Amino acid sequence: MRRILRHLRRAHSGRPGTRTCRLAALAAVLALLPALAPAGGLDTPGLATKRGDLTPKDLARVEAITRPATDFGKAEQFETMQGGAGTSKKRVNADSFSQSSANITFEEEATFKLGNAIFRKNWVSSPSSTQASDGLGPLFNARACQSCHLKDGRGHPPEGSADATSMFLRLAREAATEEEKTELAERKALNFPDPVYGTQLQDLAVPGLSGEGRMKITYEEKPVTLGDGTVVSLRQPTYSIDDLAYGPLDPRITLSPRVANPMIGLGLVEQIHPADILARSDPDDRDGDGISGRPNIVRDPETGQLTLGRFGWKAQQPSIRQQSADALAGDIGISSPEAPRHWGDCTPAQAACLAMPTGVQERLGDTEAPPPVMDLVTFYSQNLAVPARRDADKPDVLAGKKVFYELGCVSCHTPKFVTRRDAPNKAQSFQLIWPYSDFLLHDMGEGLADGQPVGDATGSEWRTPPLWGIGLTRTVNGHTFFLHDGRARDLTEAILWHGGEAQAARDRFAAADAAERAALVKFLESL
């Protein structure tokens, strides 16, 4: 392990922005892992390089059924069941992302509904008569989980209104001292917050306190001419902050806009075996395909062990529970055992914030969201069902699927996985799922870069987002804003923003004829 940490320190000690150095160092780290591992993989389960949950017979079945498609004349077996046996077959409507996994038990359905109630409830400022619901803020972005993940779906930019609830700005900088570089190398930190404003801009506050400021977005339209002469206008956003209430930002701080991700299928993603994700990592592009997917190796706060990050826009979160805890603390200001920050994102420089009362109730526990609350929120988040595919066998959809493969989209958007046999909940065990993501980091080019490193993720790298459910965004959320900041107003714009490792696929799309482009969009809308 000391050898691993020595290489990790080298990965973070080079000149900022030196991507080649970081990739080479990470490659060296990953090369060391098998040498230190027992026959079944690493002693750290989250970094296992071999599947120890399957018999040889099961492994052969998994390898066969997850092979890429070759016949585009018909739908694949089980293709409509995107979320395995838990796939929701209920009527398509605005609640399509809010259904429970179809294969949970009757008793678990009750737990799911209780978790839904907590996910939807509005927290209030302290002190209040509600007791179990107070503790909001003091600084916050939203009063409820559902405010950001409206209908359990995708967030959106403000679009000219004051409503920035489902989108916020991450605030972070790189290491500035040797001590901070060591913290990064040892995975004790992902990056460093603003000394006054913390890890994200909170535009709301409880009575008696001022919000930190307001996110400002300006757009510049950029026309792009496709191969057949079609002109598509892309909008280039610029971000700034108005009305900073507590003085200036640290000049080294970067602003990273993030919209809320859809909640569907998270429990299934959590049960993809790490070996299946790590097997797709190719930091040195040894196969020469121009794709260099990398894992974000993070330290799990609960176990203290290194593990695979797989949630969040930069794959910085190791588990749904930790993702939920950090969102409660950062977005709403609610503390939990996993993130015991009673004053949320308030910093020592914000004395008035830290002087506010908290919502901790001794009879309920020593945090505002004690373990029973976190159990319910986590279970709910793990069991939101993926909707069934639509029109998977229609000719135009199948034609679009072929284009998807031919353009090289599957190099990052891996169609299918089979979850682990030993999943804690039977509902997520040994399920064939179709997320269309490899859950690795990819350099997406300067056009999409936010300049903000997060752990192993550089300022131009993003985790491949799953595509399942993407075609129901308008149905559920009433919009079609895509990418990490919602700049793309439809799927065509989203594709044309791809750069870096995805530049070749993007260029092939731009050069395709109108019928091929339309077919590809039809395929995506069927997911």
Image (tube, grey):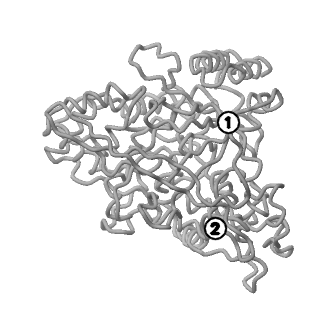
| Location of residue 256 (image quadrant) | top right
In the rendered structure, which disc, 2 or 1, sits on the residue that comes first in sequence? 2
The part of the image, by quadrant, that contains residue 479 is: bottom left
| In the foreground, 406 or 150 | 150
Q: Quadrant of residue 388?
A: bottom left
Which of discs 2 and 1 lies nearer the camera? The answer is 2
Q: How many marks?
A: 2
Local crowd size for mark 2, using a 10 Å CA cut-off: few (<14), some (14–19), many (≥20) = many
Residue 434 coordinates in the image, percent (x, y): 38, 43
Tag 2 residue: 204
Q: In x, y percent, where is residue 375?
A: 67, 62
Q: Where is residue 119 shown, x and y percent of the image?
A: 58, 68
Q: Is residue 336 above or below residue 187?
A: below
Q: Which mark is residue 435?
A: none
Of residue 460 and residue 524, the one placed in the foreground of this image is 460
Distance Cα–Cα, label 2 vs label 1:
30 Å
Query: In the rendered image, which quarter contains the N terminus?
Result: top right
What residue is at 69 percent from the left and 48 percent from the top? 249
Is 445 located above or below residue 465 in the figure?
above
Q: Position of residue 134 (x, y in %)?
A: 73, 76
Binning the other alpha carbons within 10 Å of mark 1 as few (below 14), some (14 to 19) or many (20 upward) gives many
Q: Say whether marks 2 and 1 touch (CB < 8 Å).
A: no
Left of 185 or right of it: where is 483? Answer: left
| Amino acid type of the residue that numbered disc 1 sits on in the rendered structure | Val
The secondary structure type at the circle numbered 2 is strand
Disc 1 element: strand
Q: Amino acid at mark 2?
A: Leu
Return the residue at label 1. 298
Residue at point 24%, 42% (across, down): 232
